Amino acid sequence: MKIKSVEARWLHVPIPKERQHRSDFGVHSSFDTALVKVETDTGLVGWGEAKAAVGGSGTYSSLASIINRDLAPVVIGQDPRNPARLWEMMYNRSRAHYALARGHTFPDLGRRGLSVSGISGIDIALWDILGKHLGVPVWQLLGGMTHDWLPAYASGGWADTDGIGAQLQGYIDQGAFKAVKMRVGVMDETINNSVSRTRAAREALGPDVGIMVDAHGTFTARDAMRFARKVTDCDLEWFEEPISADDLEGQAELRRQTDIPIAAGESLMTRFDFRDALAARSVDILQPDPAICGGITETQRIADLAATHQVRVAPHLWGGAIMFAAGFHICVASPAAHILEYSLGHNPMQHDLAAEMFPIVDGGMAAPEAPGLGIDINEDFVRQTTRD
């Protein structure tokens, strides 16, 4: 079997004005992603997803071009059943033969940024092909099932102090979720506003619902410490992306100052970034995004790092159906995984890109049984949302 073609498309879905929300990323007016299609000479097709932005919106022309013009020639003609080998070829490019022969990396200059996102999209598609070829779900290829069911938390939470409780309760009612995540940070203008919204959420939901808060890396280290001190009695599940990923030392200091678990990693790339975060003792919960950090191959390596260092993994799954499926399969296989992020708000890229998504039952999901990623792509949706 050989790879016949690789094609990336920029998918763009405008969000109706009445369903838009504002966060530190600005007004969330669209959902965007790069859809990757890998076709083999036997007719098997694999689907992948690559992201140029952590949020739902972004500009994807450059990422699609990197996949179509730079990465596709590396893998076309190769056997798609060897995703780990092809990952090394894409990561090391012209020096891949040295890397494979000598057992260490000789990375191309683009070892971070859009190049790794592009690798992510192709890699996810290769695992989809391998699972379909063998007739098994991807988690079976990653070592088999560790979890036959995983809880999910509803991810959203932008309303003000007066509305945040009702907004989060609305999420819970949609899927019997036992945990929810809300946004805090610079979007609130002041630390005290973030504190009051968090307190209002806890008061509205009571003591038995897990609450996570996500600052999108917008607090300074000192402000994150002040916020954490002021909400200590809110019994938070975790404090996500409290400060910039560029300040590992500040995040490590925050972690020493609070007993709220620190979650981070959605903007980190490859196992090497996560190795550095662990070495700095700056994180309790690793959050790799499979469409950003290096695909299934690399996210699995990161999950193994989490298990080795006795921290947990809860992938960043805010995006489309394909990257969600990739993270789901990794969580089914990884002993370090414990919960799934389920995007709420208006997210057609997750809920409409796949013909059928994995159902939420009693606040969680059962391990998928269909071959590959286990989802069928809605090609009408793809045609309607492809952007030149």
Image (cartoon, helix red, strand yellow):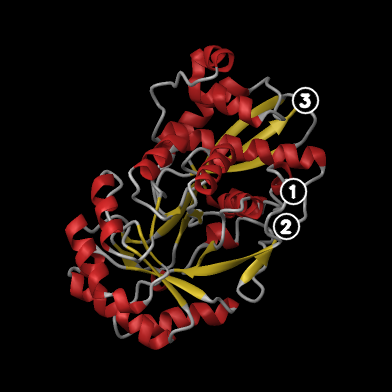
Query: How much space separates mark 3 and mark 1, taking CA atoms?
Result: 19 Å
Residue 208: give x, y in percent of width and height: 48, 83
SS for callout 1: loop
Among the two numbered marks 2 and 3 on one chain, the one whose residue lies closer to the N terminus: 3
Type of residue at label 1? Pro
Type of residue at label 2? Pro
What's the mark number on residue 368?
2
Residue 28: give x, y in percent of width and height: 37, 61
Q: Which quadrant of the figure contains the N terminus?
A: top right
Taking the image as shown, residue 102 lies to the left or right of residue 279, namely: right
Quick one: 255 or 165, which is closer to the camera?
255
Contact flag, marks 1 and 2 (Cβ < 8 Å):
yes
Give the answer, above or below, for where 263 lies relative to 122: below
Q: Which of marks 3 and 1 is in front?
A: 1
Residue 73: give x, y in percent of width and height: 57, 20
Among the two numbered marks 1 and 2 on one chain, the one whose residue lies closer to the N terminus: 1
Q: Name the residue under label 1.
A: 137
Query: How much space separates mark 2 and mark 3, taking CA atoms?
Result: 26 Å
Contact flag, marks 2 and 3 (Cβ < 8 Å):
no
Q: Which of marks 2 and 3 is in front?
A: 2
Residue depicted at x 56% and y 53%: 336
SS for callout 3: loop
What's the mark number on residue 1?
3
Taking the image as shown, residue 79 lies to the left or right of residue 109, namely: right
Residue 186: give x, y in percent of width and height: 23, 63
Contact flag, marks 3 and 1 (Cβ < 8 Å):
no
Give the answer, above or below, for where 198 lies relative to 37: below
SS for callout 2: loop
Q: In which quarter of the image is residue 194?
A: bottom left
Residue depicted at x 50% and y 25%: 91
Q: In which quarter of the image is residue 182?
A: bottom left
Taking the image as shown, residue 42 lies to the left or right of residue 167, namely: right
